[in-house]
Image (cartoon, rainbow, N blue to C red):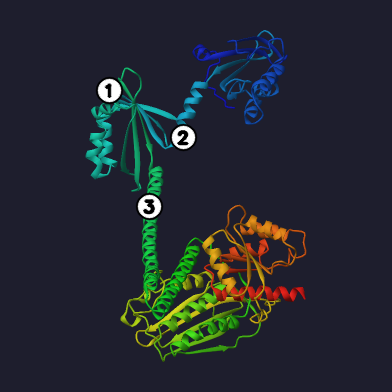
């Protein structure tokens, strides 16, 4: 509500400018004396009182909220009080929202006077449509929000330019002025455009340049940089288009695109960084595949070459020598495949920890016992020192911890000449010495010292990179995948530990691993399995489920050498049917391939365990698989499998697992 004493109540010019309705009312007697409108129905209540008419108008056109508050001073009581206070003219602007129609903005002007005939207070109300004016102001007031600084018209023939701007000191107020286009932009170019861009801007903003561009496009955009008063570099965009088909007037607008440009630059930088990262990834992938291909070919060459020689050998002694070399090459190939799979799972984030109560010293002793023959064969002294390790179990991933032990110890033995030594120290350190920031109860420190050939100082920075091996004459004849130390480093990192190396060529090396561990409070380690080497396999019967006939032939032959009778099934469904049709107790164990057509090993095992017969839950089911990662083993246990044999199957491992499974079965049956 605003008072405007400068307006005359009977100004005919104002009356007729957009007038859509008029009321004449007697406020003292609350009666509408006269009303007229343009057919919009704003005053279709002449038979009602002023208060009733105003109330009907408000409820019909003005929703609840601030707009209704703006109309309150027009109530009869408010107007009578205003007249008593010598305020005789009021105006307000409100937005009407008729049902099912577009919003409409109106201006209501009220003029109060006393009738000379009756002495009553009367009012005349004029209602004008200000929708176009309001929308225009709203549109222009929002231009700054959209980054528009200026809009204007350029008259092509006269070069006159009309600018419409939003005044900074009076937000929302418009003003316009006319000036020469070239003089206007010339001054701006000299004042605010970067010096190195001035020539380009002059040429780009010539009317001839603009018209030439508009011959082939509806809009001519032109960007340039300018310096603000504060010294900031801003990016501006000018856009030109013809106002109508006469092509005599150009409409233009100038907007600030600094933030948009900065955002685009950030996106471009991000895309370039992603592209560079992808190129590096592709390069690393190519190098990885190249290295894998090279290293795979080495043992494959040995296998193929010595196989050809074995087939042509003229003596049994030569044939056996070639077969031993084939086996050595095959072992190297298997090690390379396993290490490559491990590295692949580490890189893909699938190499996860499975902590369980463990005895770190017992795990080390198992590895040392396995490597002792290798050390004795080279006449290397292998000694261990286990200090201050309590019998209380800790939480650790046993398989990954043993892999760390195995890689470092086997490397030390491989690269130590005959007559040398390898020393292993294992101890717990106080948790206070931990610098990883990971909560722990103690630190496991594992040290491997050797008197080997050592590592060159230049090679040390690349020691843990995959497929990297130091080429020195002292290491000639020593085979390896070049992946072991890389896997050790990534495994140690996964366990939030650290690994340090101290080495001197010709003197030896010392690898130190420190791992933060928590105590397995209240948890007991699983008891060590009883020895099963004495369990006889001869005369036992096994159901073999294997779809690959070569794998089935190898497994059947190995089982036959142990005196085991074998029934074969080509898939899981056939194996289930064969077991279901047999009498209880017919099979001492089931060897189950995991990946088979029709029904895989997981489904077949679950179906066997669900059968209603006495041996369905007790018969040992042993997985034969190359899937030997932690999540694979967990899935095998969930399916009801008791153990697994990793492919390719070796006779020693097959014998050991069967003896353990059948020994456990005999114990359970007793």
2 vs 3, front mark: 3
Q: Mark 3 points at which residue?
A: 275
In this view of the protein, can residue 55 be seen by the observer? Answer: yes
Residue appearing at x 35%, y 42% in the figure: 235
Q: Nearer the N terminus, badge 2 or badge 3?
A: 2
Sort mark 1 into few (<14), some (14-19) or many (20+) by Cα contacts within 10 Å. some
Residue 541 left/right relative to 167: right
**Left or right: 72 as drawn, with respect to 162:** right
Q: Which of marks 1 and 3 is nearer the N terminus?
A: 1
Q: Nearer the viewer, residue 660 or 370?
A: 660
| Residue 336, image x, y percentages | 44, 69
Comparing 267 with 65, the one in front is 267
Q: Residue at x 56, y 80 (%)?
A: 444
Between the residue at mark 2 and the residue at mark 3, the CA separation in whole angstroms equals: 46 Å
Q: In this view, does 409 lie above or below 638?
A: below
Q: Between marks 1 and 3, how big is the CA–CA gap?
A: 47 Å
In this rendering, does residue 397 appear at all? Answer: no
In this rendering, is residue 406 above or below 275? below
Q: Quadrant of the C terminus?
A: bottom right
Q: How many marks?
A: 3
- Up the image or down, 248 lies above or below 316; here it is above
Nearer the observer, 393 or 369: 369
Whole-percent x and y of residue 12?
Answer: 51, 11
Residue 279, by quadrant, is: bottom left
Dot 1 or dot 2: first in sequence order is: 1
């Amino acid at each position: 509500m605003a008072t405007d004493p400068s307006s005359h109540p009977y100004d005919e010019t104002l009356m007729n400018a957009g007038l859509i309705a008029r009321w004449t009312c007697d406020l003292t007697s609350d009666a509408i004396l006269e009303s007229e409108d343009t057919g919009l129905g704003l005053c279709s209540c002449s038979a009602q009182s002023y208060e009733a008419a105003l109330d009907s108008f408000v409820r019909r056109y003005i929703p609840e909220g601030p707009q209704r508050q703006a109309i309150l001073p027009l109530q009869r009581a408010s107007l009578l009080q205003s007249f008593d206070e010598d305020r005789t003219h009021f105006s307000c602007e409100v937005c009407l929202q008729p049902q099912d129609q577009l919003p409409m903005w109106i201006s209501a002007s009220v003029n109060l006077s006393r009738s000379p005939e009756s002495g009553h207070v009367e009012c005349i109300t004029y209602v004008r449509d200000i929708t176009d004016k309001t929308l225009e102001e709203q549109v222009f007031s929002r231009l700054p929000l959209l980054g528009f600084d200026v809009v204007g018209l350029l008259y092509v023939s006269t070069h006159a330019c009309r600018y419409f701007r939003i005044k900074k000191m009076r937000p929302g107020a418009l003003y316009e002025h006319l000036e020469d286009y070239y003089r206007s932009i010339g001054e701006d170019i000299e004042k605010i455009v970067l010096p190195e861009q001035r020539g380009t801007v002059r040429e780009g903003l010539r009317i001839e340049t603009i018209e030439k561009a508009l011959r082939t496009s509806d809009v001519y955009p032109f960007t340039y940089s300018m310096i603000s008063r504060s010294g900031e570099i801003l990016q501006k965009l000018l856009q030109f288009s013809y106002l109508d088909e006469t092509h005599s007037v150009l409409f233009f607008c100038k907007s600030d695109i600094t933030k948009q440009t900065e955002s685009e630059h950030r996106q471009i930088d991000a895309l370039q960084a992603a592209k560079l990262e992808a190129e590096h990834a592709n390069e690393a992938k190519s190098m990885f595949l190249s290295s894998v291909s090279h290293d795979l070919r080495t043992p494959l060459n040995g296998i193929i070459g010595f196989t050809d020689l074995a087939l042509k050998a003229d003596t049994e002694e030569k044939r056996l020598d070639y077969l031993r070399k084939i086996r050595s090459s095959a072992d190297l190939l298997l090690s390379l495949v396993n290490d490559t799979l491990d590295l692949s799972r580490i890189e893909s984030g699938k190499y996860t920890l499975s902590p369980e109560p463990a005895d770190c010293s017992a795990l080390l002793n198992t590895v040392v016992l396995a490597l002792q023959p290798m050390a004795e064969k080279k006449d290397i002294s292998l000694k261990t020192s286990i200090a201050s390790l309590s019998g209380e179990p800790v939480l650790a991933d046993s398989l990954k911890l043993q892999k760390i032990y195995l890689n470092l110890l086997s490397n030390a033995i491989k690269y130590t000449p005959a007559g040398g030594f390898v020393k292993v120290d294992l101890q717990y350190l106080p948790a206070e010495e931990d610098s990883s920031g990971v909560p722990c109860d103690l630190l496991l420190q594992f040290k491997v010292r050797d008197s080997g050939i050592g590592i060159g100082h230049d090679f040390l920075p690349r020691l843990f990179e995959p497929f990297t091996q130091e080429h020195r004459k002292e290491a000639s004849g020593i085979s390896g995948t070049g992946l072991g130390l890389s896997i050790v480093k990534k495994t140690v990192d996964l366990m939030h530990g650290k690994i340090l190396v101290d080495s001197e060529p010709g003197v030896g090396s010392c690898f130190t691993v420190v791992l933060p561990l928590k105590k397995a409070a209240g948890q007991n380690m699983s008891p060590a399995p009883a020895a099963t080497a004495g369990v006889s396999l001869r005369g036992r019967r096994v159901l073999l489920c294997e779809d690959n006939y070569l794998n089935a032939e190898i497994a059947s032959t190995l089982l036959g050498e142990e005196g085991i009778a074998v029934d074969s099934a080509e898939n899981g469904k056939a194996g289930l049917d064969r077991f279901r049709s047999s009498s209880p107790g017919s099979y001492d164990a089931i060897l189950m391939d995991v990946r088979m057509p029709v029904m895989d090993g997981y489904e077949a095992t679950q179906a066997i365990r669900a059968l209603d017969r006495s041996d369905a839950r007790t018969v040992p089911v042993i997985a034969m698989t190359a899937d030997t990662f932690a999540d694979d083993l967990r899935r095998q246990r969930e399916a009801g499998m008791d153990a697994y044999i990793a492919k390719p199957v070796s006779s020693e491992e097959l014998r050991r697992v069967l003896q353990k499974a059948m020994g456990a079965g005999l114990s359970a049956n007793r």
